[in-house]
Image (cartoon, coloured by chain):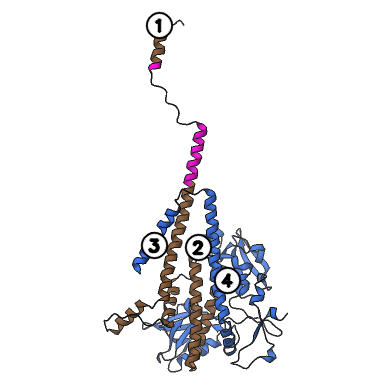
Chain colours: A brown, B blue
Amino acid sequence: MYIDPEQRQNIARRLRSLPQETRQPYDWIEFRRRARERANASSRRGVNGKKYATLAAALVVAVMGVAAWIRLTRPDMSLSAQSDATSGSGAVVIGPPDTVEARAEVAERWLASLPDEPIVVRVGTRATIAGLEDRIAQLDDFLSMARAEGAQPAKLTAIEEQRTRLVNSLVQVRYAETLVSASR
Amino acid sequence: MLRTLILAILLVPGLVLAADPPLAGDKGGDADLEAKLDAARERLQESAQEVAELTNQLNRPFFQKFSTFNGPGGRAIIGVQLDRSGGNDGAHVLEVSPGGPAAEAGVRAGDVIVAVNGTEVKGEEATRQVVKIIRAAKPDTKLSVRVLRDGKTQELTVTPRPGPGIMAFGEGVPAMPAMPPFFMVQGPLSNMELATLSPQLGKYFGTEKGVLVVRAPPDGALKLEDGDVLLAVDGREPKSGSHATRILGSYQPGEKVTLRVMRQHKTLDLEATVPEPSPGHRKDIMFQRSPPESAPAPGEVIIMRRTDEST
C-alpha cells in the first residue's frame, strides 16, 4: 500500500504528539516480590496479634497477682471495715493487726475463687498441688481431733502455723499454674 | 491502690508496644520470642515446684514428729476443721481444706454436720463423734454427710482420700507415699500434660469419658502417646487431669500398671512400669527410717537419715 510521504510525516507527527505511554509500575518479578512481602506482613500481623494478646493476658494476670500479693502482705482493710460495720460502731478504723489468721483467710478466699484446675494440667505441678492439698487436709482433720480431745493451745497454734505455711505455698504454686495457663 | 493498678494496666502494655512495634520483627525474631516465652513458662513452673519443695523440706521435721502421734500415713482424710465450741446442734465446720475431699463435695465453712452415714450427731459430743467416724473411714469409700446450712439440710457425699505419709525405705519398713509423690514431680512423668475431655472434644476422640494426653511423657514412659485418651488406670477411671495425677501418684516407681487408652478410636490396654525419678534427684528426697525394733514411743521424733549418708 502506498502512503504519501507527506501523509506519513503527518501520522508520525500526530503519534509524537500523543501523550507518552504510561510505563508499567513494576514488572512481574517485582509484582511477585511485593506479593510475597504483603503475605509476610499479613502473617507477621497475625503472629504478632496472637503474641500481644498472649502478652496482654499474661500482664493482666500478673497485675492481678501483684494485687493479690499486696492483699496478702498488708493488713486486710476490707475485713476490718466489714467487722466494724457488723459491730455497728460506724467509725472507720485501721484494720486489725496483720494476723496469721487474717492473712490465711485472704489466701483461702483467693484459692476458693480459682477454678478447680486449668484446662490443661502439667502433671509435675499438679502433683505438687495435690501433695500440698492432702497435707493441709490431713492437718485440718488432725486439728479437729486435737480440739475434740482438748489439746493444749500451744500445740494447736503450732499446727495452725504449719497449716498457714502450707496454704501460702499452695497459693504460690497455684498462682504460677494460673499464670502459665493464662499465657498459653 | 486502685488508681495505681489501673495506671499499671494501662501503662505496661503501652510500654511493651512502644519497645517493640508490631511489624518490626521478622519470622526468626518471633520464633525466638516464642522460645523465650516457653522457657519463661518452664522456669515459672519449676520455681513454683521449688517453692513447694522447699516448704516441704522446712516442714519435714514437723511432719516427722506429726506422723508419730497421728499414726501411719494412708489414713483417710476429708479435710475439715471442726469447732468444738460451736454449739450443740451438730459439729460446726470452722474451715474446709482447699482442694480437699470435703471441699470437692461442697462442704463449706459455717456448715453444721448433723449426720454422717445416717448416724445423727448432736450434743456436746457431736464433734468427737464426727472425728471418730472420719478416722474409722476407709479411703475411697463414700461417706454420706448431712449438713445444716442457712436453716436447711443438705445431703452431701464425701469421698475420703488416703492421707499422705512420710516416704520410708528400709528393712521391714513398708514404703509409704511421699508428699508430694516425687517421681511425679521430678521424674519423666512431670512433663506430661493432661486435659479433661469436654463432651465436644470427647466426640472428636470417640469417647465420652477419660483424660486427653496432650503431651506424653518423654522416652516412651508409660507407653503413652500424644493424643491418647486415658480411660482407666488399673480399672480406676480418671475424671480430670488432677484425678489422673492423683491416681498415678498412688503408685511406687517400678510398679506395673495397666493403662486403658483410646488411640485413634481404638481401645488398647497398655502394660507399663511406673518410671523411676530422674537420676540426681532421688538421693535428695529418699529417707530411710530406723529399723522397726528401735521405733520410738509415741510422741518422740523419728530420726530420719538420707539414703546417700549410709554409703
Query: Where is mark 1, residue-wise?
Result: A6
- Of circles 4 and 2, which is in front? 4
Mark 1 in CB contact with mark 2 (< 8 angstroms): no
Query: Disc 3 versus disc 4: distance between alpha carbons?
Result: 36 Å
The spot of residue B251 in percent (x, y) is: 64, 75
The spot of residue A130 in percent (x, y) is: 54, 75
Q: Quadrant of residue B212?
A: bottom right
Query: Disc 4 versus disc 2: distance between alpha carbons?
Result: 21 Å
Q: Which residue sits at x=36%, y=84%?
A: B151
Seen in the image, is B183 located left or right of residue B119? Answer: right
The chain that hosts pointer 3 is: B
Seen in the image, is A90 located left or right of residue A20? Answer: left
Query: Where is mark 4, residue-wise?
Result: B245
Residue B187 appears in view:
yes
**Residue A40 within the magenta-colored segment of the rendering:** yes
Query: Where is mark 2, residue-wise?
Result: B199
The chain that hosts pointer 4 is: B
The chain that hosts pointer 2 is: B
Task: Report the disc number at residue B9.
Answer: 3
Circle 2: residue type: Pro
Circle 4: residue type: Thr
Q: Earlier in the sequence, mark 4 or mark 2?
A: 2
Front one among B127 and B5: B5
Front one among B268 and B311: B311
The chain that hosts pointer 1 is: A
The spot of residue B53 in percent (x, y) is: 57, 75
User: Circle 4 — which element?
Assistant: helix
- Graded by Cα atoms within 10 Å as few (under 14), some (14 to 19) or many (20 or more), the crowding at tag 2 reads few
Task: Quadrant for the N terminus of chain B, please.
Answer: bottom left
Up-down: is B38 above or below B51? above
